[in-house]
Amino acid sequence: MEESIIKKGEVIGFQTDTVWGLGCMPDDIEAVDKIYEIKNRDRSKPLILMSHDVKYLEKYVFDISAQAKLLMDKFFPGALTLIFKRSNLTAPCICAGFDTVGIRVPDSRNFREITTRVKGCVLATTSLNISNEPPCKDYREACEKFANRVKIIEPKYGESIQNVASTVVLCVNDEIKILRQGSVKIRKN
């Protein structure tokens, strides 16, 4: 395997299917701290875990209900973030004091290319922006605003992005609760 695209303490910017993202290794406390500093992000807001395949994310969560599994089967890969109880493998530094963690599998060849070159194939992520400002729209904007603070990964494939955040659904104790309606439309039962 070639050398990892990301090193200890490093933060990268990358394209996904929804918005540009900011990420680091999920157990790298120094890099997680950098993400909060770069974004001026409130420490009470958690990061999420993303990979190109759900099989790499499942060990970070537990109690995946039948309803949640149906959502994963239908919308992964895609613009859906599911929040579960976190396992002991999930670093507390990304959870902002919660006992839960969000997971997502973007529908993006660019993102897949990155995570296949990362140890464990998982990144701790958030959107690439200063908190309360819109996420970067493209590679040029990402470089203009953040290249002096993070390693920006140029997209290899000519994919378009939605510029709409993912839908966020809480999946705890057999409860399915929509916390943010994004581009994936989920009906409430």
Image: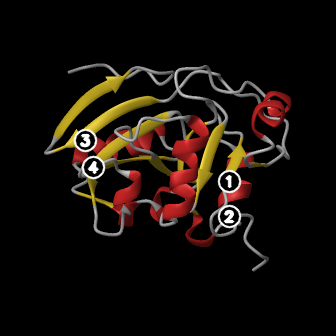
Q: Tag 4 or tag 1, which sits nearer the N-term? A: 4
Nearer to the camera, 81 or 64: 81
As drawn, the label of residue 171 is 3
Q: Are marks 4 and 2 in contact (CB under 8 Å)?
A: no
Q: What residue is disc 2 on?
A: 116
Q: Is residue 106 visible?
A: no
Q: Secondary structure at mark 1?
A: helix
Nearer to the camera, 166 or 131: 131
Q: What residue is disc 1 on?
A: 112
Q: Is residue 98 visible?
A: yes
Q: Distance between the Cα atoms at labels 1 and 4?
A: 29 Å
Nearer to the camera, 107 or 19: 19
Q: Distance between the Cα atoms at labels 3 and 2?
A: 27 Å
Q: Position of residue 39 (x, y in %)?
A: 57, 36
- Eye-nearest disc, 4 or 2: 4
Q: Tag 2 or tag 4, which sits nearer the N-term? A: 4
Viewport quadrant of the C terminus: top left
Characterize the local packing of mark 1: few (<14), some (14-19) or many (20 or more) Cα atoms within 10 angstroms.
Answer: some
